[in-house]
Image: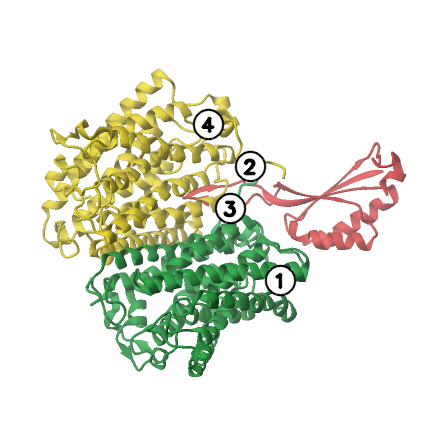
Chain colours: A yellow, B green, C red
Amino acid sequence: MINSGDTAWVLISTALVMLMTIPGLAFFYGGLVRRKNVLSTIMQSFFVLCLISIQWILWGYSLSFGPDIGHFIGNLSWAGLRNVGLAPNPDYAATIPHQLFMVYQMMFAVITPGLITGAFAERIKFSTYIVFTLLWATLIYDPVCHWVWGTGGWLKNLGVMDFAGGIVVHITSGVSALVCALVIGKRRGYGREPMSPHNLTLTVLGAGLLWFGWFGFNAGSALSANGVAVSAFIATNTAAAAAALTWMFIEWKLVSKPTMLGGATGAVAGLATITPASGFVSPFAAIIIGIMAAVICYIAVAVIKLKFTYDDSLDAFGVHGVGGTIGAFATGLFAQKLINPAGANGLFFGNPSQLMVQSIGIAATVIYSVSVTFVILKVLDLVMGLRVSDEEEVIGLDITQHEESAYTLLD
Amino acid sequence: MINSGDTAWILMSTALVMLMTAPGLAFFYGGLVRRKNVLATMMQSFFVLCLISIQWILWGYSLSFGPDKGHFIGSLAWIGLKGVTMAPNPDYSSTIPHLLFMVYQMMFAVITPGLITGAFAERMKFSAYAIFTIFWATLVYDPVCHWVWGAGGWLRNLGALDFAGGTVVHVSSGMSALVCALYLGKRRGYGREPMPPHNLPLTILGASLLWFGWFGFNAGSALGSNELAVWAFIATNTAAAAAGLTWMFIEWKATGKPTILGGATGAVAGLVAVTPAAGFVSPLSAILIGIAVAFVCYTAVAVVKLKLAYDDSLDAFGVHGIGGTLGALLTGLLAQKLINPAGNNGLFFGNPKQFGIQAIGVVATIAYSVTVTFILLKIIDAIVGMRVPDEEEVIGLDITQHEESAYTLLD
Amino acid sequence: MKLITAIIQPHKLEDVLQELDKNEIHLRTVSDVIGCGRQKGRTEVYRGRKETGGCLKKVRLEIAVNEDFVQPTIKAIMAAAKTGNIGDGKIFITDLVECIRIRTGEKGQEAIG
């Protein structure tokens, strides 16, 4: 039975998650790069929205959610949305049209490769980026999505809890981002020249829109306008606030001043971290998860990255990879059946085995994403080259990859 | 009984009101300041979102809506959301989870102190701001909210009408803003040096997002997806449009040219004024409210402020204080039971008493907010100091308070 | 004819312009520039990464004058721009080979005033 309230909520949630990719992520990342690369950075988010919107309809949805093959991937019987109609599919959501579930999930498939772009900003060749994104979505996102959320997926059968995509979205993209940063190498002059963000107001806009859209991402994942959606909504807002406050406080006490960029980064780290847990945890657990997210992601971004001098340019790994991992663990600690009877209790509520299950899910996803990403990058490097030439990098990607400039110099 | 349509609409409205603070208000104010202070200004909106999100869960909601104490404030019985569950609370809304009502109200508590920041922009110390905000929210917002909306609150018992927060949000913040502007004094060079807005497109973006989010603020205050929400939605849009047009027309006649900043300011003034009236008045009354507020606020901002030479830098008092007061009084004239049977008729519909009640509500709120704000400022000034030193003010708050710059000069 | 170029603190600009007007020196070009000297740049922090040596905002004044206005101009700038702290700026004086007013084609001392 289709419920009009549930359908209304998932419709608007779908639009909210779409907003997260552009302009949310596009502006969040766009403000952080140098002036000569802002359009190419925005383009990466914009392009992934267009590309995966088509890929998902043609074969992505079928691979992710279609009838199971060996607990590993969906088959192609739903390719081109064959057999995906308006009647609800009770395996996934019993009160909204199946096609609505499909398009809602599409927006998750869209933003995930978009998150990776933070790792290779300001130096990847656009043509290579297109091929990489298509392969990555098909070979990594679709299978992992099937493992965790698809009917018959092996992690789903194992009982792994991932409410809105901590594993599926943030771990896959975050650890792949690290591989990208390492394989592609640093930006020219990294560490020697200043590479300050060229327009932080854009970044604040992006962070605000991400926060806003994340309500659709997490609360929408209840797939219904009910109590679970409300508790996911509250957990989302609470974790974002707690993480941003903690991040600024760390800066204030340890470095010197609380910064706007720090607040925005902390909020996004909190949002990424609460994603798998929202819908399973209480508001107080959300505060603790937010604090953990800020402390650990801060260390990853401001200490470890500088020490090992890899150039994860916009901290896709430091925020999403690390945050998603903490969140997936924390779900195994703080989950409560009281909040969501469809879930399970975590370690702190008398069920230590859940933490084990979560760890298996994390380890499998990390290993799989890292190896496949590495292979894709190596092949692409041989076939078409990953980086733009040195000269093009100095001139900037806006001019060399897209032949346009974001700002005029005069008038 | 929880209704999924109502729940869907309030979930969305909550997200919309969140969007009003950051990035809506952050950008509206951020574009109006000088380039050296834009991040500090945005930070004030962003920070209040984080801070009050936590304060509200811990004690703010209980003080505002918890079981009544002497008609003045809520008790601490609901502290930490104790007893606040998914079951609807019929005192406030019988068709959505009580926790959803809680988080919806949270976003109102968030934006209210954020509005004040327009009065002390470009000169307040960040540490003083953090302390001021938490105390102001607890000692001014929470009690006034209880008077007007809390079960047992004395203004609610008296029959004061405030649909979406004209008194609770705009009068309380706007009047406190005037106190702040007077207490802190003018910006260095105010009146001698030009202080033009550094980036008006940011302000337009902010104003548009405010208008967009205001549908959640006003139509969401129906707490259901019903006729009342539709009335409030129409009144909101109508008043904003009428006020924007009127403001530009006044400028055209008074100074020669209509300005986009004038249009944006007028629209926000219209939104403020219609807030208390939204669910009680007809669309034609909304036009009247819009026209009236444009004239009154224009006079406050462009004539009175210049004459008395106080530095209400971004017109928090002129728009929200004056607009909110006017709106609350006009509700006493234009309200109709025909629109909202749960409301009352105003003076023009045969019930002169309502106007008196509205006036009592406004006067009590002003007297209380002004007094408590003044005492707070005195105490905080004595302990940490309110203003940054002259030299830091000249260099700008972005560098001195947050050690970052919004824009790079080269590259 | 001399070209006087002064790099001063931005917040002293108003004072300097007033002082110049008092001495009847009205023609000048003002631009925003960045640079650093002994004052060093300010540090900025982005996600824990300190960026030092960033330059500071300054204002550059360019004034072309006849010989008898050289000393008054210098005095006016000195008087208004000096705070006594590091970072007050510098004044450079260079010989001017020629000056031409585009509208009339006048040259030299005629053109400069």
Q: Which residue is mark 3?
A: B406
Instruction: Report if the CB atoms under discs 2 and 1 are less than 8 Å apart.
Output: no
Q: Chain of mark 3?
A: B
Q: Quick check: can you spot residue A118?
A: yes
Q: Chain of mark 1?
A: B
Along the viewing direction, whichever of B235 and B251 lies nearer the viewer: B235
Residue A206 as seen in the image, left or right of residue C95: left
Helix, strand or loop at label 1? It is helix
Is residue B361 positioned above or below B221 on the image?
below
Q: Earlier in the sequence, mark 1 or mark 3?
A: 1
Instruction: Report if the CB atoms under discs 3 and 4 are less than 8 Å apart.
Output: no
Could you tell me the amino acid type at mark 1? Ile
Helix, strand or loop at label 2? It is loop
Is residue A62 positioned above or below A296 on the image?
above
Residue C27 as seen in the image, left or right of residue A319: right
Badge 2 crowding class, 10 Å Cα cut-off, few under 14, some 14 to 19, many 20 or more, is few
Q: Of the numbered discs in the image, which one, if any, rests on residue B250? A: 1
Q: Which residue is mark 2?
A: A407
Q: Of the numbered discs in the image, which one, if any, rests on residue A188? A: 4
For the residues marked 1 and 3, what is the alpha-carbon distance in whole angstroms?
Answer: 35 Å
Helix, strand or loop at label 4? It is loop
